[in-house]
Image: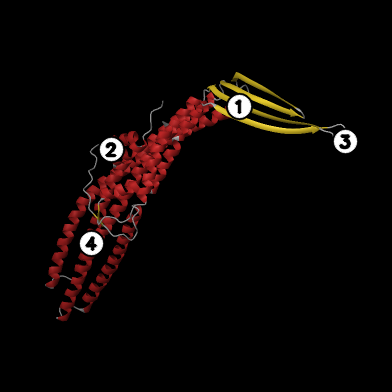
């Protein structure tokens, strides 16, 4: 059973590696769901976590091998001679063959070692689940960064268009003598700043696309269009309920609980190793001796049962028990510390979603006001009722409001997913589907 599970896991790992060698041409329109699927099929960290599962599955089997029979064989030959005077020697040639079979009948340490191996395998599976979820969250972060930079490029393009229109208007009014040259020069300063900002945002967009392509194991120079995903619903539970759910569901916390149990089994294994053990053995051999003109042989066999009782170990037992007890204490403290950190992370993520939710309401109203203010001041400038500095300040305010709205709009979407990740609800279906490939068989 163990070997078959390892074989199936190896096949899954090979399939993942082959998927990584697939053609790296992305679709023309890449959705967030497609990005998730691509990452889960090709990401190296997931393949490494899967390999760790394969290795951890060996530990229960290794524990059981302590009770398997052992067969040993030996073969030896010798040649000797002796003489009293001259070169007249008595020569003798001998050979020995022997087979021995031993079988442990009772080893109290096997049970705890086997259970500790199962728990270690379970820990590797929880690590695998956490890796899948964190990889998906990393994909979402890279994906929304592309969307954010796209939105900022659009905002900066519109700001550049408005700055060009303002400079053109100032130039027209200068031509007819309605304004002085400082209006044109001030508008040109705003225009040049808008050009620089646009170039910077376009380059940041290229970088964000490259990082997303690398995350998904596409060619870095690949071109694709990302699609706006649907809004991510925020949980309706209260903050205390979310903290409690995170403690129940998070893979890292469950792993630390499993570690605590495994440390307990390690302590049981140490205690059991000092209990009596029983072994059975049987062996048979044949000796052949050839001396000058005669050959004789003898066959012998032996069988028996032995009881081994540790009586004195020089203090090793006490030191091993103290070591295991310290490991249990450390594992308990690690869990308590991680549980507090989980509460803090859930609280911070929950507060961020609430802050961004309120900010979006304010920013949308701010953008509407900034658009109206800029439109009114521009019309007044055409009629000579406002100053160029007022119009340019209104343009700067509009650009700032639109930029903040674009940034926080996608930040709120990512924050909602981060909150779900902190409670282990993020991409649950994908995580469960991936975990089904490496599900641990129940103890026999």
Q: Earlier in the sequence, mark 1 or mark 4?
A: 1
Quadrant where the C terminus lies?
top left
Residue 155 has which mark? 4
Give the Cα separation between the discs numbered 2 and 1: 69 Å
Residue 99 has which mark? 1
In this figure, which residue is indicated by the disc labeled 3?
86
Q: Position of residue 76 (x, y in %)?
A: 67, 32
Q: Earlier in the sequence, mark 2 or mark 1?
A: 1
Mark 1: which secondary structure? strand
Quadrant where the N terminus lies?
top left
Mark 3: which secondary structure? loop
Q: Position of residue 163 (x, y in %)?
A: 21, 69
Query: How many neighbours does mark 2 have within 10 angstroms: few (below 14), some (14-19), or many (20 or more)?
Result: some
What residue sits 28% from the left and 47% below the top? 415
Residue, far front:
293
Q: Position of residue 119 (x, y in %)?
A: 43, 32
Give the Cα separation between the discs numbered 4 and 3: 112 Å
Which of the two marks, 2 or 1, is nearer to us in this view?
1
Q: Is residue 302 above or below residue 2?
A: above
């Amino acid at each position: 059973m163990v070997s078959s599970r390892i074989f199936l896991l190896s096949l899954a790992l090979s399939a993942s590696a082959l998927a990584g060698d697939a053609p790296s041409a992305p679709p023309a329109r890449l959705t967030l769901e497609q990005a998730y699927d691509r990452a889960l099929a090709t990401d190296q960290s997931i393949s490494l976590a899967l390999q760790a599962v394969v290795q951890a599955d060996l530990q229960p089997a290794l524990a059981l091998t302590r009770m398997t029979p052992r067969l040993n064989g030996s073969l030896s030959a010798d040649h000797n001679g002796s003489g009293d005077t001259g070169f007249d020697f008595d020569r003798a040639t001998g050979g020995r063959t022997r087979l021995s079979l031993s079988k442990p009948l009772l080893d109290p340490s096997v049970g705890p070692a086997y259970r500790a191996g199962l728990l270690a395998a379970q820990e590797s599976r929880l690590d695998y689940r956490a890796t899948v979820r964190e990889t998906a969250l990393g994909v979402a972060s890279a994906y929304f960064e592309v969307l954010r930079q796209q939105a900022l490029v659009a905002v900066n393009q519109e700001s550049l268009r408005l700055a060009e229109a303002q400079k053109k208007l100032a130039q027209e009014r200068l031509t007819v003598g309605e304004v002085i040259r400082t209006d044109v020069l001030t508008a040109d300063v705003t225009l040049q700043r808008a050009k620089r900002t646009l170039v910077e945002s376009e380059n940041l967009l290229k970088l964000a696309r490259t990082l997303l392509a690398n995350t998904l194991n596409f060619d870095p120079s690949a071109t694709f269009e990302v699609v706006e995903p649907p809004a991510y619903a925020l949980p309706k539970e209260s903050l205390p309920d979310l903290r409690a759910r995170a403690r129940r569901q998070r893979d890292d916390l469950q792993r630390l609980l499993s570690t605590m149990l495994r440390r307990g089994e390690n302590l049981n294994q140490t205690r059991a190793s000092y209990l009596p053990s029983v072994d059975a053995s049987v062996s048979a051999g044949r000796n052949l001796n050839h001396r000058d003109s005669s050959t004789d042989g003898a066959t012998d066999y032996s069988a028996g049962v032995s009881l081994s009782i540790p009586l004195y170990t020089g203090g090793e037992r006490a030191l091993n028990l103290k070591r295991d007890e310290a490991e249990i204490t450390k594992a308990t403290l690690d869990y308590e510390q991680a549980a507090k950190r989980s509460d803090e992370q859930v609280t911070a993520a929950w507060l961020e979603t609430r802050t961004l939710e309120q900010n979006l309401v304010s920013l949308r109203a701010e953008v509407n006001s900034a658009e109206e203010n800029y439109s009114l001041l521009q019309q007044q400038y055409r009629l000579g009722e406002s100053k160029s500095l007022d119009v340019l300040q209104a343009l700067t305010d509009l650009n700032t409001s639109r930029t903040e709205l674009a940034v926080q709009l996608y930040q709120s979407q990512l924050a909602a997913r981060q909150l779900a990740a902190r409670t282990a609800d993020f991409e649950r279906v994908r995580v469960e589907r991936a975990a089904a490939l490496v599900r641990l068989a129940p103890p026999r």
